[in-house]
Image (cartoon, rainbow, N blue to C red):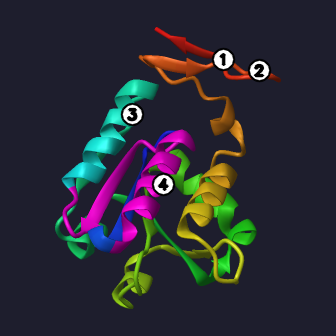
Amino acid sequence: MAGKVTVLRLSHRRSRDVRVTSHCALVSRAFGADGFLLCGERDEAMLLSANKAARKWGGGFGADYCDNPRKFAREFDGAKVHLTMYGLPLMAEIGKIRRRLAKENLLVIVGSEKVPAEFYGIVDFNIAVGSQPHSEVAALAVFLHELFEGRELEKKFANAKIRIIPSQNGKNVEKT
């Protein structure tokens, strides 16, 4: 895949969304995205935590704040995907999205509270990971897993300070 994947988390609310937004950032990194942008209420603690995890567990992932998600999405140079239960079925569209990623960058938009209608028109793909209510964390994980055809699960993260050594019994952690 030639392009980079950035996840844009809309409408973060510190009082309500910190855990789910943190999980969106962790899933983004672990499942192959290159970056994460937080929109809504600025939350330095959440960004610090996401970047600390990236430094500890390795890879080139970074999290940052975006104060104008509409402008960022409109001006994004690449394909844009909005994850919504109202979109087209993931499995019917994933091939088109992979082909776009082979040529250009990809922005994956994940909502929080009600997503402004404008975003449905800004994007190239409105994608449903199932057409039932579910977690945005789950939708993001399933989407990235399908996008990378499962290869992200075997990814080796460069410059990791800590690694899990697979084990049937117990915890086996290697510090580098």
* Residue position for label 1: 172
Other-residue count near label 4 (Cα within 10 Å), few / some / many at <14 / 14–19 / ≥20: some
Q: Nearer the viewer, residue 128 or 133?
A: 133
The answer to whether the residue labelled 1 contacts the one labelled 2, judged by CB atoms less than 8 Å apart, is yes
Disc nearest the viewer among 4 and 1: 1
Place of residue 176 in the rendered image (x, y in percent of width and height, measured from the top left): 46, 8
Report how far apart the C-alphas of labels 4 and 1 lie in the structure: 23 Å
Task: Specify the farthest residue to the right.
Answer: 168
Other-residue count near label 1 (Cα within 10 Å), few / some / many at <14 / 14–19 / ≥20: few
Place of residue 175 in the rendered image (x, y in percent of width and height, measured from the top left): 49, 11
Place of residue 142 in the rendered image (x, y in percent of width and height, measured from the top left): 66, 58
Report how far apart the C-alphas of labels 3 and 1 lie in the structure: 20 Å
Other-residue count near label 2 (Cα within 10 Å), few / some / many at <14 / 14–19 / ≥20: few
Disc nearest the viewer among 3 and 1: 1
Report how far apart the C-alphas of labels 1 and 2 lie in the structure: 7 Å
In the rendered view of the protein, which quadrant contains the N terminus?
top right
Residue 23: which numbered mark, if any?
4
Q: Amino acid at mark 2?
A: Ser
Place of residue 16 in the rendered image (x, y in percent of width and height, measured from the top left): 36, 73
Query: What residue do we see at 51% from left, 24% from top?
Result: 157
Looking at marks 3 and 2 on the same chain, the residue that comes earlier in the sequence is marked by: 3
Q: Kindly tell me whether residue 13 is visible in this rendering.
A: no
Residue 36: which numbered mark, if any?
none
Query: What residue do we see at 41% from left, 54% from top?
Result: 22
* Residue position for label 2: 167
Q: Amino acid at mark 1?
A: Asn
* 102 lies above or below 110: above
* Residue position for label 3: 54
Looking at marks 4 and 2 on the same chain, the residue that comes earlier in the sequence is marked by: 4
Query: What is the magenta range?
Result: 16-43
